[in-house]
Image (cartoon, rainbow, N blue to C red):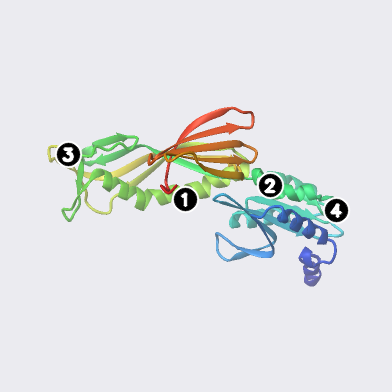
Amino acid sequence: MTKEKKAKEKKPYNNGKSFENLNYLIQLAKNDNPNTTVYFDHKLKSKVGGRRQFDIIIEIKSNDFIFLVGIECKDYNTTNVPIDRIEAFQTKCNVCGIDRKIMIASKGFQKEAIDSASFFNIDLYILSEISSEDVKDWIDIERFKFIKENYSIQKIILLLEKETSVEFIKGEIPINLKVQTTNKSEYSLGTFIQSIFSNQIDQRLGKDYSTIWKENISKNGFNLMGGTLHYGSTLNELVELIDDNEKKQLIQEVHFYIDASLKNETVKNINVKKFSKHQLNEEMLAVTGLIDKYGTFTALKKGENKELEVYFTNLEGKSMKVIGEVIDKSP
């Protein structure tokens, strides 16, 4: 009985001719997208250890981002795909960082499986109904979203001895304040707080982003999540705050209140079709580029000036001026 089950779930690209057309369509779409790589019977590293196997992985590179499409193929000739296969696929995609999830069946899906796929944002396809346009859509970079992290320190509170406290709004710490540690070393208060944030708070903040917020924003389809996060830190050694009058007070705890947000943003694939460079005179260099689907930009560099005059004209003919800084001073 076990052997029959394994035979039924054989990998589709080895199952004869049923999935050959799909492979052909994927390769055809890939040829039109040079930044796309297709892997068959591929294993990805899991966040919980080990590696997980995928029937097809499509890797798409755009600017500084890499997006992964995970495809699972179910060649069930006599039955529809059940819900447990959907849930297992969701778990595998979640621990491997898949950005778009697709399941393909040769026959169909049970109703509970369809409902579950809708909840987990898994796209379902019937093998015989897949067109070349469907496959092109799978690797359309503008269909993807990346999660942008943003946070800023709203306030910092130092709890001192004798139930007193000092509060700093938006992380603005007076440069004249100092701290002294057990070994009598003195540091600026700003350096001390930055050390605590880097060594203790930053890791906890990153964990909250990845394990709580990112999973929810991806799973539930939210475009924006935000709020104020509170982190307290106790000190491993005696540290005293020194004020302007050289008065010392023992610091017992440091508390950070952080305004944080996650936002789903659509990737824009900027393709510069034409690029030209003109030395207008000894003092002025002009660079012009046509950005596909957006418009034309022109940048003017005047002599050794570090500022660029940048003009952008959209497809409707409306222009705007922006200012940038020259990083590479070479003409």
Q: Disc 4 to disc 3, how far (Cα)?
A: 76 Å
Query: In the depicted view, which residue is nearer to us: 31 or 273?
Result: 273
- Rendered position, 11 above or below 188: below
Q: On the image, numbered disc 4 is attached to which residue?
A: 128
The residues bearing labels 1 and 2 have C-alpha atoms spaced at a distance of: 30 Å
**What residue is at 69 percent from the left and 50 percent from the top?**
139
Distance from disc 4 to disc 1, alpha carbons, whole Å, reads 43 Å
What residue is shown with label 1? 207
Residue under the point 58% across and 61% down: 46
Q: Quadrant of the N terminus?
A: bottom right
According to the picture, the residue beneath numbered tag 3 turns out to be 243
Q: How many labels, in total? A: 4
Image depth: mark 2 or mark 3 in front: 2
Residues at marks 4 and 3 touching, judged by CB atoms closer than 8 Å: no
The answer to whether the residues at label 1 and label 2 have Cβ atoms under 8 Å apart is no
Q: Secondary structure at mark 4?
A: helix
Q: Secondary structure at mark 2?
A: loop
> In the rendered view, would you say 150 is above or below 78?
above
Instruction: Please state which of the two labelled residues, at mark 4 or mark 2, is closer to the viewer.
Output: 2
Say what amino acid the circle numbered 4 marks: Ser
Query: Which element type, helix, strand or loop, lies under badge 3?
Result: loop
**Label 4 vs label 1, nearer the camera:** 4
What residue is shown with label 2? 140
Task: Please say if 6 is above or below 105.
Answer: below
Q: Position of residue 143 (x, y in %)?
A: 66, 44
Could you say where residue 221 lies in the image, as x and y percent from the top left?
62, 40
